[in-house]
Amino acid sequence: MAGIPKDTVAARRRDEDVAASPPAVLVKQVFSEHANFVWRSLRRLGVASADVDDALQEVFLVVFRRIAEYEDRGLIRPWLFTISRQVASHYHRGNKRTEMRHQGLVLDTSGTDVEEALARREAEDVVRSFLDELDEPQRIVFCLSDIEGMTAPEIAEAVGVNLNTVYARIRLARKRFEREIARRLGTEEPS
């Protein structure tokens, strides 16, 4: 490797050693299988679309550092969600003003019907405003259950609460969502 500085050669060898190490291979596999889940989780935890890729990268840096501590009990998604939640929490503390500027959605009318796009945006606004009204514990279990399709035991593990508490939060959030939809459609029954 004549002509290449020794520091560069040493750095390349270190990078190759890290890339071939068992933790790196395992993280690569976890990333390929669960990156979409983590990305969606970060979005639902309020990370702005402009920042979600950076937050995703931060999650998997944590995974890389902590993969040796992970005990495989078939609960990788709850573990990843817990890390995602921590990264999102750090994001919110550090980027409150930036998040407020990026809240708006850009309407792309190039490839879709304008009415369909407007209906989709309205539906997204309804769900987003509903989620904003929920307290954090209900919002988390509602998103994980009804949007991500996780089971209650997986959610209990990810959030660190009793299984019955998860079921109760899901039930309450679903009732509130049904009432919100009924109210918006004008079919709400008097209490």
Image (tube, rainbow, N blue to C red):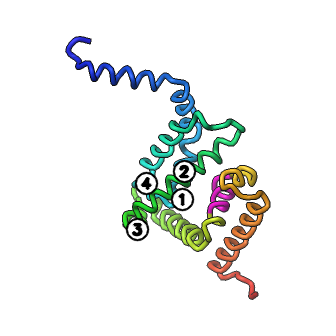
Q: Give me the C-alpha separation between circle 2 and circle 1.
A: 8 Å
Which residue is painted at 63% across and 38% down in the image? 70
For mark 4, does the 10 Å Cα neighbourhood hold few (<14), some (14 to 19), or many (20 or more) residues? few
Kind of residue at badge 4: Gly
- Residue under numbered circle 1: 45
Above or below residue 153? Residue 124 is below
* Contact? badges 2 and 1 (CB < 8 Å): yes
Quadrant (top left, top right, bottom left, bottom right) of the C terminus: bottom right
Magenta-colored span: 140-149
Q: Amino acid at mark 1?
A: Leu
Q: Was residue 71 drawn as part of the magenta stretch in this picture? A: no
State whether residue 72 is above or below residue 78. above
User: SS for tag 2?
Assistant: helix
Q: Position of residue 129 (x, y in %)?
A: 55, 72
- Within-10-Å neighbours for mark 2: few <14, some 14–19, many 20+: many
Helix, strand or loop under label 1? loop
Q: Which mark is residue 111?
A: 4
Query: Which residue is under mark 2?
Result: 84
User: Image quarter for residue 138?
Assistant: bottom right
Q: Earlier in the sequence, mark 2 or mark 1?
A: 1
Marks 1 and 3, Cα distance to the nearest angstrom? 14 Å
